[in-house]
Amino acid sequence: MTRTALITGITGQDGSYLAELLLDEGYHVFGMTRRSSTGANERIAHLRDRIELVQGDLLDQASLVEALRTSRPREVYNLAAQSFVPTSWNQPVLTGEFTALGVTRLLEAIRQVDPGIRFYQASSSEMFGKVTESPQHEGTPFHPRSPYGVAKAYGHFLTVNYRESYGIFAVSGISFNHESPRRGLEFVTRKVTDGAARISLGLATQLQLGNLEARRDWGFAGDYVRAMWLMLQRDEPRDYVIASGEAHTVRELCEVAFGHLGLDQRDHVVQDPSLIRPAEVDLLLGDSTRAREELGWEPKVGFEQLIRMMVDADLARMRGSRDGDRPDASAYAEPWARAGAIG
Ligand code: NDP
Ligand code: GDR
């Protein structure tokens, strides 16, 4: 029998990779999208004739019930969220509505329509925030440092609670940063690979960044969506950390990206104090032993390979476009700085 899955956030980075994986596994894939006046769904354009889209919004309970009734899934992957940490200081209430309460709405819809549905919640290493130990594992206490991290902690505990209260097969994947050529331009890896490619083509000379000493555990999104799927195939629901187990600074990220193009990042990267966050997460480093042992999961793409892949993709895209005239990632000023609210 064909298995059916519903993905919220299918237009995002992870949604597009997960849809590809589930199609390869023989699933009937539904994606939930919210109404947009532009209809820009470029990450799933190549899948459009193989997936079905249903309209729904995490803000609207009735639309979630209807999306479930239409798609009748066996598995639901909740990837939709306001996912950019800086925006969460500028729009804390909306971030809470999407990223925290949206999880309650979706789980309530599942309870109403079919409590036998298996549910995946996209939790985040940002919940660890000001870390109390390194590396971080499933038992490490949370100390989120942004309204986004706080909202994700709510979604995480709500998922655990619906599992314990109602016996729903609901699991939380605590993913560390994962990237790809489909990453949004505002996130630091893509901002750097896009910026380095622009500079190498003579389209720009400088790249403005915030904290160069922040350390992150970066992996490839294509590897991480496989872990999400594996979690829903287990006999028993359980939460898992998904991480590469290697941390690098933003400065090292710049060295790899610029170095790949024969450039020295010190000639181009400029620190902009307005890009420093009101509260920073200095170090994230994940211990995914449980996922490796119980799911048989392991990442295939390493850090340098990932960054070089992203640089090459940005370069190819810019060379392919007639004039290279598209928004520069550095044009995405951090929202609190723009609003003048903080700093
Ligand atoms: P993206 O920002 O690329 O995608 C977010 C998706 O959520 C988009 O499809 C967006 O749709 C959708 N969305 C936003 N608000 C709503 C809403 N109100 N109703 C319905 N859909 C909405 O995120 P990623 O793919 O990178 O991440 C996927 C999930 O994993 C997110 O929840 C993120 O917080 C979490 N996560 C990501 C990590 C990472 O490193 N990438 C690490 C840990 C967790 P639209 O196109 O309409 O904007
Ligand atoms: P993060 O990712 O906040 O970890 O959240 P991001 O790439 O935005 O930042 C990573 C680190 O880089 C530093 N940094 C900059 N960041 C951005 N965006 N722009 C800059 O110019 C810049 N300069 C330095 C940041 O201060 C930070 O320390 C991502 C998102 O995908 C979340 O949804 C997800 O939950 C977490 O990863 C795990």
Image: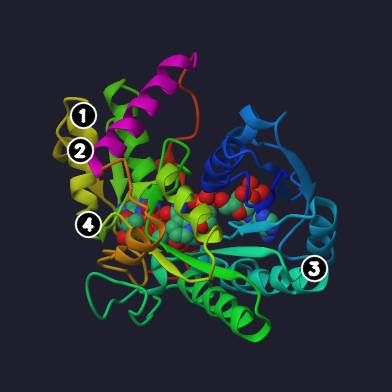
Image quadrant holding the C terminus, namely bottom left
Which circle marks residue 61 in the picture?
3
Disc 3 + disc 4, Cβ < 8 Å: no
- The alpha-carbon separation of the residues under discs 1 and 4 comes to 19 Å
**Residue depicted at x 44% and y 72%:** 146
Mark in the foreground, 3 or 2: 3
Query: In terms of secondary structure, where does tag 3 sit?
Result: helix
- The alpha-carbon separation of the residues under discs 3 and 2 comes to 45 Å
Q: Is residue 110 magenta?
A: no
In the depicted structure, whether residue 316 falls above or below residue 62: above
Decide if residue 173 is on the left or right side of residue 257. Answer: right
In the depicted structure, whether residue 314 falls above or below residue 244: above
The residue where tag 4 is placed is 247
Residue 54 at what x, y percent from top left? 79, 47
Q: Main secondary structure of the magenta part?
A: helix
Query: In terms of secondary structure, where does tag 2 sit?
Result: helix
In the depicted structure, whether residue 215 falls above or below residue 181: below
- The alpha-carbon separation of the residues under discs 1 and 3 comes to 47 Å
Q: In the rendered structure, which disc, 1 or 4, sits on the residue that comes first in sequence?
A: 4
Which amino acid does the dot numbered 2 rest on?
Val
Q: In the rendered structure, which disc, 3 or 4, sits on the residue that comes first in sequence?
A: 3
Residue 238 seen in render: yes
Which circle marks residue 260 in the picture?
1
* Nearer the observer, 167 or 337: 167
Magenta span: 303-322
Mark in the foreground, 2 or 4: 4
